[in-house]
Image: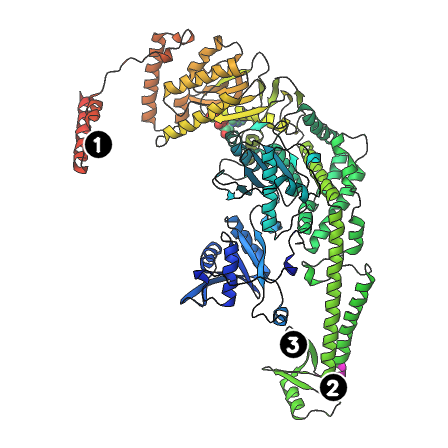
Amino acid sequence: MDREAPTAGTAPPRAFGVDTPRAFGATPALAQWFAVKAEQPDALIFFRMGDFYEMFFEDAELGSEALSIAMSFRGEHQGQPVPMCGVPHHSHEAYLARLIRRGFRVAICDQLETPEQAKARRASIIARGIVRVVTPGTVTEDSLLEAFRPAWLLALVEGGAAWLDVTSGAFETEAGADIPALLARLEPAEVIATDGLWPDATPATPPRDAPARLAAAFGVSTLEGFGSFSAPEIAAAAMVLDYVRATQNGALPHLMRPVPRGTAGVLAMDAATRRSLELLRNERGDTRSTLLHAVDRTLTGAGARELAARIAAPLAERAAIAARHDAVSHLSAQPDLRARLRAALKGAPDMARALARLSLDRFAPRDLAALRDGLARADAMAQALCPPLPHLLAPEALRPQNSPAAELARALAETLPARLEDGGVVAPGYDGELDALRRLRDDARGAIAAMQMELAQAWGVASLKIRHHQQMGYLAEMPAAAGEKLLRDPPKLAGEYAPQHRQTMSSTLRFTCGALADLDRKLNAAAEQAASRERAIAQHLRKLCLAAAPGITAAAAAMAAIDVHAAAAELGWTRPEMTDGVDFTITQGRHPVVEEALRRARGPAFVPNDSELSAGSRVCLLTGPNMAGKSTYLRQNALMLVLAQAGLFVPAEYARIGVADRLFSRVGASDDLAGGRSTFMVEMTETAAILNQAGPRSFVILDEVGRGTATWDGLAIAWAVLEALHDRLRARTLFATHFHELTALAGKLPELRLATMRVREWKGQVVFLHSVGVGAAERSWGVHVARLAGVPRTVLARAEAVLAALEARARQGGGALSDELPLFTPRKPEPEHPVLDALAEIDPDALSPRDAQEALYRLRALLDGSRAS
Ligand code: ADP
Ligand code: MG
């Protein structure tokens, strides 16, 4: 795509001097700063001055604080010193990275002309302007990106969303998006939204002529060929494009055509579900101990990004899932082929991101090399893939049409400089004109050596050396004694060779002469011409790459997919059998993350477990003491479903899974005395979402729901939820609970099966077997667990006595639970304690601190009295 606005280099010099009271009386440079700041008031301005990017005023305060660099003052403005801090231009990327990570936006204000050009147009100051606004969702530098995560920029409008990754060109939309679920799925680097739609988003507005703008960006007259989009999707897509353009000074990166994602083909998971399953991030927010971390055997950044995307958005269509399984199967069955493919992937460059930098004309020589090497790897992979092949492993995409690979291989030098300006990008023999210019330049270098000999002889100074100086070019240098003699007694020579003194240093003197100056000029000219020729060739190569961009993008995507399929095969797991029914049969399933954690800690081996939630036994009620493995078992089955529908294999001996449309996972909030009410509220809101959305094709795990409230409330709610899931929603459900009373439902709900974590008692200690058995837990093991946790013996003894008494009372009362719901019968009023009566009479608001203390003493006395009696 071409630039819409003029590029930085050709932009007309910006008018400066804004007429705000704040800018009044500013120096020309500060006036420029005020103008730029007015353009980007929300960004820190990196204001280029010579070799530094400077920040001024409030930016300097924020910047010096965020970067821990010193702030100084420069001159005065309106009678006040001007705060300033700066970072060197050559290392600014590292500082930029820190600011972006801290959540700042940074506007890069560069010098748009050389001092000579400014002089030529009689300007008092060099023209400057914003060439780019750096935001978390629009960066392309590797140092600013996470290699293993896509960098989504998400745009939200009422009723639709669009998101793109400038570093890969991926571009997708969704109608009627559920914003929290979308955020949880994409984990965007940056969000923009129409006013008020999402609190943390940067405000934005869709353009008026959204469809036309979107079509124009892709060079088509209508969007029909791309699929069907709703009006809000188009508005969001046009809005996100405009935003990218605004940050890139009018340029757009290479983008794939937008794909309406619809939610139909994707397993729906809401934010709470993702959080509790720890798919890409764990509860602490980092990426260790997550499903992704446990299964990731990919070898490339692009492969890791693709794997993360698949786990974040598993499929919900059997054929599409099976196609991925076919690819993994093929590579599982052919370890040699897999090894060849992985050898080609190992160390392969990130073509998608290199292409993004090329398309934004912000590239380094290594980006060209990345395409050369990446395409060579792709070709090697294509050669390794021999038919018959499952269609996702078809090699065609690995060999793009009009591939620039051969041209790049011829053009690029063997070792490349870090920056284009350093020269030496183009290989000798590629371009005749460049070779000639370089010869001239190198000849001139030889001529310097010759000139050194000539001058040494002519001036009679054997120690004379010709050296190059940044400011003054080539000069003849000699020790002070020889130099002073030359000054006192210059040789009688023709003008061309007559020594001219330039500089006296402490121990050396520097001279030039007409012939040397002449040579210096020639050399400069040759070097400059060679450099400019090289720049032109680099641009030519860039255009070749961009012309083949769609093919290169497809090749990069094909490599990433193969990386994912091979990585899945690498785990040696089992292909799940997928059905369109509501099956869920697992034999000897494992929890990949817990298993890995146990292995790493050299702990006991993970105990595999079976599951059966197919028709006829859809709902499983799991009891068992704390720490017995209930949560692990629930999650392992949910993760099995995620892995299978993401197109990966599963950690089990056998799996038969009916494709689910929605997956829900809820973990009951723990008792939280301070915020108990609100956590319970959250728990109930989340549970309500399940009851409103789950259906017969859904899969639900509920882990101790109702835990966050008083026992009877919690039990009542858990009971009602379980009944609803069983009778009305008919979802496959795993329900862990510490409410033993719930097991009474087994006789009433035909599809409810009881399961319990097996536990053994050994020498008065509880031993967890971590295996799931049929039936209900015999008793509560809470007291045993308390002992494990180190609760003092006196307290344990008391607890055991209380438990025995309670159990005896329960036996007397009889098991009335199975017949009706005694939970809902009013409780018998219990005899009140005198302390409680006294407490009830106290009005805390009416007490002075002294009264309060006295009341405490009184209560305490009452308590002691009643204990003594
Ligand atoms: P619960 O939810 O019943 O309190 P968890 O599922 O949290 O128990 O498990 C507690 C601990 O037991 C886990 O952290 C893990 O170390 C261990 N564990 C759980 N399941 C297994 C298993 N199947 N095999 C081996 N260890 C397990
Ligand atoms: Mg638990």
- Locate residue 178: give its quadrant: top right
Q: Main secondary structure of the magenta part?
A: helix
Compute the Cα span from label 2 to label 3.
Answer: 18 Å
| Residue 44 locus on image (x, y percent) | 50, 55
Which span is picked out in magenta? 453-463
Look at mark 2 in the image and give the residue it sits on: 497
Choose between 329 and 254: the one closer to the eye.
254
Secondary structure, mark 1, is helix
Mark closest to the chain's N terminus, 1 or 2: 2
Crowding at label 2, few (<14), some or many (≥20) Cα neighbours within 10 Å? some
Q: Amino acid at mark 2?
A: Tyr
Residue 519's x, y, as percent? 74, 77
Residue 825 shows in this picture: yes
Judging depth in this view, the residue of 519 and 17 nearest the camera is 17
Along the polypeptide, which appears first: circle 2 or circle 3?
3
Q: Nearer the viewer, residue 669 or 480?
A: 669
Q: Is residue 346 left or right of residue 38?
A: right
Residue plotted at (67% across, 54% down): 363
- Disc 3 residue type (three-letter): Met
The 10 Å Cα crowd at callout 1, few under 14, some 14 to 19, many 20 or more, is few
Question: Residue at label 3?
Answer: 472
Q: In this orientation, does residue 605 appear? A: no
**The quadrant where residue 205 appears:** top right
Disc 1 to disc 2: CB gap under 8 Å:
no
Please give left or right for residue 58 compared with residue 349 in the image: left
